[in-house]
Image: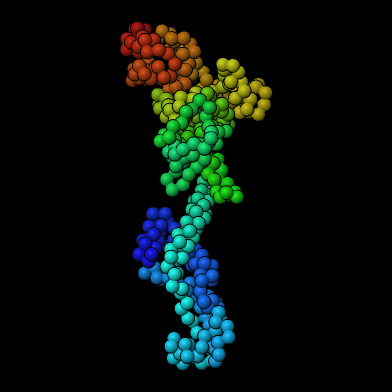
Amino acid sequence: MNAEFIAMLDYLERERGIKREILLEAVSNALLSASKKSVSASRELRIDINPKTGEIRALANLIVADKVTNPQDEISETAARRIKSDAKVGDIVEVEVTPKNFGRIAAQTAKQAMMQRIRQVEKEMIYEEFKDRAGEIVSGTVRRFDRSDVILDLGKFEAIMPQRERVVVEDYNVGDRLRAYVVAVDNGIRGPEIIVSRSHPNFVRRLFELEVSEIADGTVEIRGIAREAGYRTKIAVWSANAKVDPVGACVGMRGSRVKNIVRELNNEKVELSLAIGKKGQNARLTSRLTGWEINIQKDTSATTAVEQKVAQAAQALSAALPISDEQATTLVKSGFTNLEGLRDADVQDLVDVLGIDEAKAREIHEAVKEPEPAQ
């Protein structure tokens, strides 16, 4: 029992991060309750556990009596002097009262007490670790499913992604690696629960904050975000710095930044502009984003200037390439603002950005390579 007990304490302290003192206290309290039923003397009973050897003893403070009338509380003067040579009637002497079968009782009780205390401590550790982490993005592996809820393994802890927080078009399998947004850490009756989401609008917000340095340092602000998870997200961005194009900063060179985010969202469409979309999606998103009926007016010359530049660049591309005006605008907003930039792109870039087949993408790619006509 002793060697096994110490080995278990070492393992739990090393691998689970549970302090030895906490477990020893739990075991001691459990053994105290169990031993009261089997010891002959139990006045001021206590359990002593040697943290190095694992030796367990039951000790009681007994009153030295000239004649023992209550064995539960008293000890004879003769017996007391075998423990303490100068003991006399009326003294209190600590006596070992460990029962003969205590090893079996201790082993069973200690195991039960440790398991119960481990569960309590781990729940406390989960809450302490995550109580201030709501709003962060965490990474985990799909461990199992609880009905329609996804249980993620975060390492030492588990998180729950309820059905309402799932993306309807995403399928998850055991072993899949996922990133998710921590919605809340609830400390309920059943213990703390880490609630995560992949459908929450702030999941996209946090992805942009991690991907776009201008958002991280405050140069560009996300003023509003609306999302139909799995289909489309609209984001309103703004910058107090007139020299910074907030949309361009979020898109990145040749769409590199927004591509990383779209990849994380499993090709969900991310828009940094407002337009009327299929089946009214954009209209609903825009209304949700602004909180008003759609009646949008630009009020800054800087925004107008950016739109003019986008229109001019799109016009130049549509005139030089076999693409529509809408496709040209999409290319510009994705970071391909001129033919020179498109020459560095590959066919797959055009397929991804324009949503066209590979044959059409190759046609455009070949046209980009052709020299521009002399003016």
Colouring of the image: rainbow
Is residue 210 visible in the rendered image? The answer is no
At 36% from the left edge and 18% from the top edge, which residue is drawn? 348
**Quadrant of res 89:** bottom right
Q: Is residue 205 above or below residue 113?
A: above
Taking the image as shown, residue 343 lies to the left or right of residue 68, namely left
- What is the x, y in percent for residue 296? 63, 22
Pick the quarter of the image with the N terminus: bottom left
Taking the image as shown, residue 224 lies to the left or right of residue 54, namely right
Question: How many marks do you count on the picture?
Answer: 0
Pick the quarter of the image with the C terminus: top left
Residue nearest the viewer, comparing 196 with 174:
174
Residue nearest the viewer, comparing 255 with 164:
164
Q: Is residue 121 above or below residue 311?
A: below
Taking the image as shown, residue 365 lies to the left or right of residue 266, namely left
At 52% from the left edge and 20% from the top edge, which residue is drawn? 307
- What is the x, y in percent for residue 315? 46, 12
- What is the x, y in percent for residue 105? 46, 65
At 44% from the left edge and 22% from the top edge, which residue is drawn? 334
At 50% from the left edge and 90% from the top edge, which residue is drawn? 77
Q: Is residue 17 above or below residue 274?
A: below
- What is the x, y in percent for residue 141? 43, 38
Taking the image as shown, residue 337 lies to the left or right of residue 201, namely left
Residue nearest the viewer, comparing 170 with 94:
94
Is residue 225 visible in the rendered image? The answer is yes
